[in-house]
Amino acid sequence: MGLTVARTAKVLGRAFDDVLAETGGSLSTWTILFALKTSATASQRELAEAAAIQGATLTHHLNGLEADGLVTRRRDPANRRVHLVELTEAGEALWQRLVRVAQDFDARLRDGISDSEVHVLEQVLNRLQHNAFQQA
Amino acid sequence: MGLTVARTAKVLGRAFDDVLAETGGSLSTWTILFALKTSATASQRELAEAAAIQGATLTHHLNGLEADGLVTRRRDPANRRVHLVELTEAGEALWQRLVRVAQDFDARLRDGISDSEVHVLEQVLNRLQHNAFQQA
DNA sequence: GTCTAACGATTAGCCGTCAAACGTTTCGAC
DNA sequence: GTCGAAACGTTTGACGGCTAATCGTTAGAC
């Protein structure tokens, strides 16, 4: 049932946000920093796609991150439409701290769950996403 | 990874909301009507718990549903602190229609997924919720 | 019996998300 | 070369969710 998926996502999100808050982060900053570090690209459009959020939402968060001195935005000289987003030193430091917290949280979640179960979970969830798109 | 759970929940929620919208509903109204029909209680506090949302949020949605003539609120004569929420005829009719849509959607989601996989999914998700609460 | 604490619901304010409209820049057709 | 279409980012308006504070009601202490 999709209800269980939704409820689990909510519970996990809240719990994760709580532990991030203790380190001076939040779920939204984590999501964006994660996208920044893993997607290797820096255009806002690709960033939004990597974070699975809308461009408008990303703009909102980047404004906050930029105001906090965690990231910088500058025009791409080659294509002045796109904004290149880069981590500042402060942003990099926060990222390092949040990664540790996230790893601890992930380990906590996995407690008592076998690798094969995790594998089935990922597979079924992906199948669900695929099925949700099918038809109208 | 919790990321996959969050992303799946988002995709499923959007898709479900879309199909509900075609029948004149929405994800939030579905959630509340579902809680109303399945939890057999009608106090707002219990309703909010069943729907996994905050009491204040429920009040907000009930205002909308009441304005649309789908539900009624009245004081419990036995304990005038609690408000009893009941479906009107229009609300009942909408519920009947939404149930069909939800069943179709659920069948669509389950396509290509075995019963045992569904079972593992539910079990692991519940375990994740439990683990998220442990410790601080 | 009164008075205080607890409870249920509401209100007010904030945050995160989305869709739609807009301004700017680039690119292709001609 | 110019002009229209497409791409990128931002702004605006709306919605759903939460927390904190408040109001009305009830139950218990004494």
Image (spheres, coloured by chain):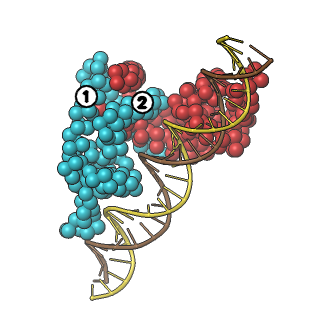
Chain colours: A cyan, B red, C brown, D yellow
Query: Residue at position x 29%, y 36% from top?
Result: A23
Query: Residue at position x 58%, y 33% from top?
Result: B55
Which quadrant would the C terminus of chain B be assigned to in this image?
top left
Helix, strand or loop at mark 1: helix
Quarter occupied by residue C29: bottom left
**Whole-percent x, y for residue C22 in the image:** 45, 70
Quarter occupied by residue A116: top left
Query: Residue at position x 22%, y 52% from top?
Result: A87
Front one among B99 and A83 = A83
Q: Which amino acid does label 2 sit on?
A: Val
Identify the mark at residue A11; answer none if there is no mark: 2
Q: Can residue B128 be seen in this view?
A: no
Mark 1 surroundings: few (<14), some (14-19) or many (≥20) residues within 10 A: few
**Whole-percent x, y for residue B122 in the image:** 41, 23
Mark 2 surroundings: few (<14), some (14-19) or many (≥20) residues within 10 A: some
Query: Residue at position x 56%, y 26% from top?
Result: B50
